[in-house]
């Protein structure tokens, strides 16, 4: 066995360090957690997209994944519980040129922020949502969430959850989302490409990331470590691009359908607003272009 | 590398080479990079880092082809690879004949 060279890597810089607040790294996420991998994929996609750093904003809610806003060296907001999408909507309305990304968890987006999610999807707001789905509220000790599969055991479901979970892609698809994809924390390349597509996609984009939670979900259900969960994803996920989202529900420790389900063009909120008001108000209507209108764009 | 059939252009194409960099004290020892490295370059170290985890060590540096999977899958931004320049002479000889 090779001996550990502790001096190795002391003076090296990670390729993504320009996008990370290095004074806060290492992050708080547990060993084997998939949120770090998802953040890695997101930052890689941001780097590849070529969008300037000042034109992108990250909004996150409360929970494990809510910490992500504190680690990215972009304009970022750590908002109140469930209210990440309203903040993102406000950002997009105030500055339509901004690329707004919501980085939040399943409990934040689907339980407390459920109404905001469906209405943002209905309006086709031009925001990108990365939903980390680890099937429970991990930061508060493992309460079951709207996505917990039936029969999964958690702190508040000691005999197994008996509630029907959300089929998240079907929910957002039926509400009118124009880009819906689902990947796991193992599909790093496809997830990165999907986030890259979503960043350039006009309209409401929703990417669900099935993420490993070794400390709560896997421990309560005796599923092993984060690595064991990744091995499970590898053996049981089936890529079905364009699959009917109605059939994409998740059952406890059964086949996972992943892929890009929906990718369609539809007028966004800003498009319909400009079109409708131009017709009804006429020349008096001046579309709002954001705070930088008329000014020379300088600075970084 | 193992092939089920030797590629026709095996003499001309040279697989890229990479060098793996690890920030040992940032690693949390989840083992993702070690398990999913397609060339089995990495292995758990027997020693601990400052936080008490077993970070990976580069066991077979000559096998790395700079695919970047370790960099993409690492949740802790602790490992990445950089391309290694290879001598050009061998490439020209192989390509010419």
Image (cartoon, coloured by chain):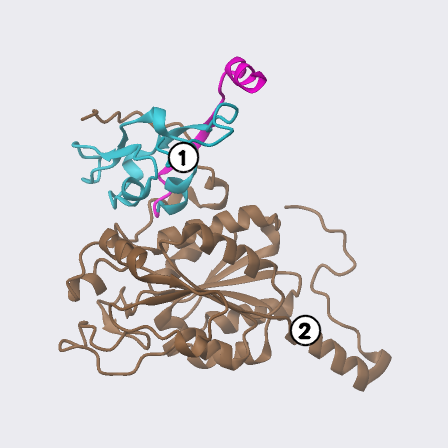
Chain colours: A brown, B cyan
Residue drawn at the location 16% of the way across and 32% of the way down: B46
- Considering the image in quadrants, where does the N terminus of chain B appear? top left
Residue drawn at the location 49% of the way across and 71% of the way down: A85
Residue A104 position within the rendered picture, expressed as x and y whole percent measured from the top left: 41, 65
| Cα–Cα span, label 2 and label 1 | 56 Å
- Considering the image in quadrants, where does the C terminus of chain B appear? top right
Mark 1, Cα crowd under 10 Å, few <14 / some 14-19 / many 20+, is: few
Residue B40 position within the rendered picture, expressed as x and y whole percent measured from the top left: 30, 35
Residue drawn at the location 22% of the way across and 68% of the way down: A142
Image disc number at residue A270: 2
Q: Quadrant of residue B67?
A: top left
Q: Is residue A9 visible in this depiction of the protein? A: no
Are discs 2 and 1 less than 8 Å apart at CB? no
What residue is pinned by disc 1? Answer: B5
Name the foreground residue: A65 vs A267: A267
Segment tinted magenta in the rendering: B75-97
Residue B89 position within the rendered picture, expressed as x and y whole percent measured from the top left: 53, 13
Residue drawn at the location 51% of the way across and 27% of the way down: B13
């Amino acid at each position: 066995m090779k001996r550990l060279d502790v001096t190795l890597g002391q003076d090296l810089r990670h390729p993504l360090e320009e996008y990370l607040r290095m004074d806060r790294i290492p992050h708080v996420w547990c060993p084997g957690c998939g949120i770090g991998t998802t953040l890695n994929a997101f930052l890689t996609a941001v780097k590849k997209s070529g969008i300037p750093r000042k034109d992108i904003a990250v909004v996150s809610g409360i929970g494990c994944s809510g910490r992500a806003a504190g680690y990215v060296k972009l304009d970022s907001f750590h908002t109140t519980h469930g209210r990440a999408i309203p903040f993102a909507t406000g950002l997009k309305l105030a500055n339509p040129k901004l690329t707004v990304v919501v980085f939040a968890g399943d409990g934040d987006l689907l339980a407390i922020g459920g109404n905001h999610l469906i209405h943002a999807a209905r309006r086709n707001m031009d925001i990108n949502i990365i939903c980390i789905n680890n099937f429970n509220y991990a930061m508060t000790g493992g309460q079951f969430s709207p996505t917990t599969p039936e029969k999964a055991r958690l702190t508040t479901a000691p005999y197994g959850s008996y509630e029907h979970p959300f089929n998240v892609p079907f929910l957002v698809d039926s509400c009118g989302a124009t880009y819906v994809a689902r990947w796991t924390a193992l599909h790093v390349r496809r997830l990165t490409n999907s986030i890259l597509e979503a960043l350039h996609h006009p309209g409401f984009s929703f990417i669900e990331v099935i993420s490993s939670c070794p400390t709560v979900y896997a421990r309560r259900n005796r599923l092993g470590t984060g690595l064991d969960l990744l091995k499970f994803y590898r053996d049981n996920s089936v890529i079905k691009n364009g699959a009917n989202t109605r059939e994409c529900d998740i059952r406890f420790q059964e086949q996972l359908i992943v892929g890009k389900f929906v990718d369609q063009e539809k007028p966004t909120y800003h498009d319909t607003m400009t079109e409708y008001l131009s017709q009804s108000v006429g020349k008096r209507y001046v579309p709002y272009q954001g705070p930088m209108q008329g000014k020379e764009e300088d600075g970084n | 590398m193992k092939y089920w059939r030797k590629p026709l252009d095996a003499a001309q194409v040279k697989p890229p080479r990479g060098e793996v960099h690890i920030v040992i004290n940032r690693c949390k020892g989840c083992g993702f990079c070690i398990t999913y490295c397609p060339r089995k370059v990495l292995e758990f170290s027997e020693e601990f880092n400052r936080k008490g985890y077993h970070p990976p060590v580069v066991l077979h540096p000559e096998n790395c082809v700079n695919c970047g999977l370790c960099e993409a899958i690492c949740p802790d931004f602790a490992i990445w690879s950089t391309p290694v320049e290879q001598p050009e002479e061998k490439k020209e000889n192989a390509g010419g004949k």
